[in-house]
Amino acid sequence: MNQQTAWLVLVGAAVFETAWAIGLEYADGFTNLRASVFVVVTLAISMAGLAKAVEVLPVGTAYAVWTGIGAVGTVLLGIVLFDESTSVIRLACIVAIVAGVVGLRVTA
């Protein structure tokens, strides 16, 4: 796998990270079977993508980008799906995470 493909796999893995994190809300402490299965499957896909990406990318950079994208995606979906806060400070923190992820990608 080349670097470009590894970055694409990493971004895909981060999307699945967002999916399993949001799925936790629906799993209701793992009492909802369908949502719990969704969480476990998307978690496995997310981890497998991260593992594949770190075969090519530096692990520190890949992990930080994976968690950053996952965190931002989860926060944004939390705002849309669960009416979570959109305070200026919270949105500024999201911008800071995105800046960090972009910075890590540019310097990798």
Image (tube, grey):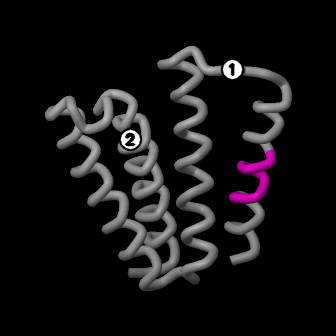
In the image, 87 versus 46, the foreground residue is 87
Foreground label between 2 and 1: 1
Q: Which of the image's four quarters has the C terminus?
A: bottom right
Left or right? Give the position of 19 relative to 76.
left
Vertical side of 44 occupied by 83: above or below: above
- Disc 2 packing (10 Å; few <14; some 14–19; many ≥20): many
The secondary structure that dominates the magenta segment is helix
Residue at 69 percent across and 58 percent down: it is: 101
Q: Position of residue 7 (x, y in %)?
A: 51, 67
Vertical side of 70 occupied by 105: above or below: below
Residue at 83 percent across and 36 percent down: it is: 92
Residue at 44 percent across and 70 percent down: it is: 5
Q: Position of residue 22 (x, y in %)?
A: 42, 35
Q: Which of the image's four quarters has the N terminus?
A: bottom left
Give SS at disc 1: loop
Distance CA(mark 2)–CA(mark 1): 20 Å
Indicate the amino acid at tag 2: Ala
In the image, 38 versus 12, the foreground residue is 38
**For the magenta stretch, what is the residue range?**
96-101
Pointer 1 residue = 85
In the image, 61 versus 102, the foreground residue is 61
Q: Position of residue 79 (x, y in %)?
A: 59, 22
Which of the 4 quarters of the picture holds residue 60?
bottom right
Indicate the amino acid at tag 1: Ser
Q: Position of residue 36 (x, y in %)?
A: 22, 39
Pointer 2 residue = 19
Give SS at disc 2: helix
Vertical side of 17 occupied by 53: above or below: below
Residue at 42 percent across and 69 percent down: it is: 50
Between discs 2 and 1, the one toward the N terminus: 2
Which of the 4 quarters of the picture holds residue 102?
bottom right
In the image, 29 versus 62, the foreground residue is 29
